[in-house]
Image (cartoon, helix red, strand yellow):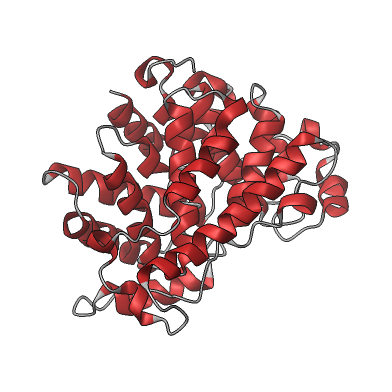
Amino acid sequence: MTTKPTNTKRAATGSLIGLALGDALGFPTEFNDVPRILAKTGPWRQMDLPRPAIVTDDTQMTLALARGIRTAAERGRVGPLRLARPVREEFVDWYHSPENNRAPGRTCLKACSLLNHPERDWRDASQLGSKGCGANMRVAPVGLVPGWTEEERAGAAQLQSALTHGHPTALAASDLTARAVFLLAQGTEVTGLVGQLRSYALENRTRYHERWLGDLWTRTASDASAESFMARGWDECLEVLDRLAAALRTPSPETDPCLTTGDGWIAEEALATALQCFLLFPEEPLLALRRAACTAGDSDSIACLAGAFAGAHLGADAWPRDWEGRIEYRAELLSFGTLWDA
C-alpha cells in the first residue's frame, strides 16, 4: 500500500469541500428519475455546479457534527459523555435554525425534537426503527479528525448515528462510512478498498460498543443480545458490499448505479452507491460527483458521500477553484479542513 501524508494532500479539506460540492450538485436532481434529470441538465458528464451552489441538510448536519467534535476535543480526550453533549446541542441548534429548510429527513426532525428536552436520555430520543441515510451522510468528520484510536473512531461514528438513527444498520453503515473516509485519507489504494471494508465489517460483526451506546440495544424487542443486535446491522452492510463488488467486476458507467446497489434512501445503500460512483472514477472526481448526482435515488446524499470519498482520496486540489469558491458554508468547511489537516 502506498500512502501520501494527509497533511500533504490536505485530505480533510478535500473531503469536506467534496462533500458539500456533491450535496449542491445533487440538490436539484433529488426526487427526479434519470430521464427527467437529463432533460433538465443535458448530458450527465457535463453537469455544472448550480449558481448559487446551495447545499442541503446533509452539509448542515456534517458541520453540526464537526462543531460538536471540535468542542469535545477542546475539553480533552474524546469519550462518549464528552462527545454526546455538544453534538446533541449542535443537532438541536440545527433543528431550530431558520436555515433548516432544505427538505430534512423525518427521522432527524423527530429525534431532534426529542433531544430538545435536556432532561431526556438521548437513547430515549433515538429512532431505533430507522436506518435512513441521515446517519451516515454526515459522518465524514469522524473519519477525518486526527489522533483517534480505532475504538474511538468506531464508537464516535456509531454514537453520532444513534442520537437520531438507532437501527443497527444505521450504526454499522455510519461506522463503515467513517472507516472508508479514514482509509482513503490515509492513502489506501482504491483497488483494495471494498475488500478492506468487508474485512472490517466481518471483524466487528458482533462487537457492541457498550461504552458509547450504553443499553441502546435493549430498547428493541427484536434481539436476544447486544451481539445479535449488531450482527443484524453488519449483515445488511455485508450484503450490499457484495452487491457493490459484483457491480464493480462489470462496471457500467453509463448505467444508473442505483440499479445495482440501491437508491440510497437507506444507510447501507447510500454508502454502497456512493462508493460505486467514486470507484467508477477514482481519479476523475468531477465525473464521480456528476454520476452520483444523476441517479434516480437520494441524489444529494449519494453525491455528498461520493465527494467525501473522492476528496479524502485526492485531497484539496481535486476540486476546481471556481466550484470551491461558490459553495455555501465555504469558510466554515475550510476552517475545519485546516484544523484537521494541520
- Name the residue nearer the viewer: 86 or 231: 231
- Name the residue nearer the viewer: 235 or 31: 235
Inspect this view and state whether residue 300 appears: no
Figure quadrant of residue 32: bottom right
Figure quadrant of residue 223: bottom left
- Residue at image position (38%, 21%) is 6
Q: Is residue 30 left or right of residue 54?
A: right
**Furthest residue toward left:** 75
Residue 190: image location, x then y, percent: 59, 27
Q: Is residue 160 left or right of residue 250?
A: left
- Name the residue nearer the viewer: 22 or 251: 251
Figure quadrant of residue 30: bottom right
Q: Is residue 104 above or below residue 274?
A: below
Residue 270: image location, x then y, percent: 61, 53
- Name the residue nearer the viewer: 89 or 246: 246
- Residue at image position (44%, 41%) is 179
Q: Is residue 172 left or right of residue 259?
A: left
Residue 167: image location, x then y, percent: 47, 69
- Residue at image position (57%, 36%) is 195
- Residue at image position (65%, 42%) is 25
If the image is split into quadrants, where does the C terminus sit?
top left
Residue 123: image location, x then y, percent: 30, 74
Inspect this view and state whether residue 293 appears: yes
